[in-house]
Amino acid sequence: MSYRAAVVGVGLTDATSPRKQTLSTIELCQQAVRAALDHCGADPATLDAVVIGNIDGFEGTVLGGKHLTRLLGIGADLPIVIINTGGTTGGNLMQVAARMVRSGTHRRVLCVGGPTFFGATDLQSAINTNSPMIVEQPLGMGAYHMGAFAASAYQERFGLTTEDLAIVVVSDHRKAAQNPHAHLRYEVTEQDVIDGRPLASPLTQPMVCPVSVSAVAMIVADPECVEDLTTTPALIRAMGTSSDPYLGGGKGDFSEMQNLANLANRVYALADVRDPLEDFDVVEIFAPYAHMQPMQLEALGFAPLGGGVDLIRSGVTDSGGSLPTNLSGGPKCTNAGVAGELSPYAYAALQVMGDAPGALQVAGARRALAHGTGGSFFQFENLAVFETLTREH
């Protein structure tokens, strides 16, 4: 029986706008799956199961998981597990696959995260159905209105400025410009961000993620059964999920991410992480709004409360800094729904495998943190710690 699991193959497609999409959703998923198989040299016949994400209500097809998996070209008889946990679906795919492998019932599981928003005629109306019906929907609040709750609370408590938010956006765009798979591959200035179209105070349009189309695939395997593969496995050292209550009133203090901090303490204990700022070589976090990245860095133990922006301003989170964060550009520059949520896990795993795209690779990266979140008020969190698999393991 296996008690360990590792990522052995990753496939990413280039991201774009739905309006500029030239490949169908099926073709994108096929491309990502083939890239993951080619990455590690795995034979499709060695796969035991497929875990695929599907967000009912947002997808353009019913039971999209079954619709897609029949056409991936990896065999018609593989068991399928369909995950639908809303905005956290992508981040939970790998965790489900890892538990299947750790249980000893499966040796090699394929995870597939496709684009989520390809079929929505009125995307904002579709996303707004996610908000709680008891209070939020009657008030007419949309996705970025609910995102602004935390931004306003953080601003009130710690004095966050529009210039602070602009710094975060400029940093993410600078990194995304180096990522061949990113959607928004251009740089912006602080003034561009400040002068952007107002959405919900204090957020302007450049502070909010785009709607992207892309696909991500990942192969999770028993690290004792990788002799036929060509990659250096990324051991999933620790992982976990947690949640706040569904309604916004159950979140407690919107100015800090207490739920994420609690989850981080638990996952760090499993991975023997004692000093997060020293123990991680690279971090990929899911921050689709500008204010979320500093708040998440604080909750993850990299900065004191209110100190996340200072950490970003200092250059610590830049490429070449001591804690490179979201070198992919993160969801601020590419967010394709399920694929977007799986992406932090894909990029973090690639870093410790030594296979991150081009200029994104952190030299000597051996331990990485990946994070995902979702929910109307981002009540639901998931985390994983990856380590380069060595003989000592």
Image (cartoon, rainbow, N blue to C red):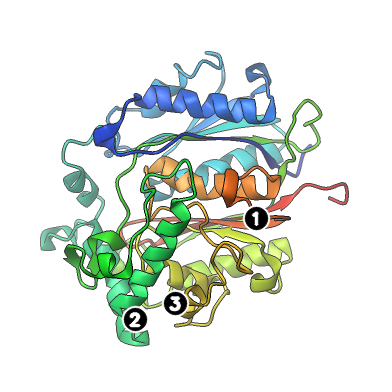
Which residue was labeled with disc 1? Answer: 362
User: 310 and 46: which one is in front?
Assistant: 310
Give the number of callouts.
Answer: 3
Quarter-wise, where is residue 362 in the image?
A: bottom right
Residue 180, compared with residue 246, is above or below; it is above
Say whether disc 1 or disc 3 marks the residue closer to the N-terminus.
Answer: 3
Q: Which residue is mark 2?
A: 160
Do tag 2 and tag 1 residues touch (Cβ < 8 Å)? Answer: no
Mark 1 or mark 2, which is nearer the start of the sequence? Answer: 2
Which residue type does callout 1 highlight? Val
Side of 365 where 190 appears, left or right: left
Q: Locate residue 224, reporting x and y percent.
A: 81, 36
Does the rendering let one see residue 120?
yes
Query: At 54% from the left edge and 65% from the top edge, which residue is drawn?
Result: 318
Q: Position of residue 73 (x, y in %)?
A: 51, 15
Which residue is painted at 30% across and 30% down in the image?
21
Label 3, label 2: how many angstroms apart (C-alpha)?
Answer: 8 Å
Front-most of 306 and 13?
Answer: 13
Q: Amino acid at mark 2?
A: Leu
Q: Is residue 60 left or right of residue 264?
A: left
Query: Compared with residue 222, is residue 302 higher up or lower down, i.e. above or below?
Result: below
Q: Which of marks 2 and 3 precedes in the sequence?
A: 2
Q: How packed is label 1: few (under 14 Cα within 10 Å), some, or many (20 or more)?
A: many
Query: Which residue is labeled 3 in the image?
Result: 309
Give the quarter of the figure containing the N terminus.
Answer: top right
Residue found at x 58% / y 67% = 264
- Res. 11 mark: none
Judge depth for marks 1 and 3 and give the one in front.
Answer: 1
Q: Nearer the viewer, mark 2 or mark 1?
A: 1
CB atoms at circles 3 and 2 under 8 Å apart? yes
| Residue that protrudes farthest toward the top in the picture | 76
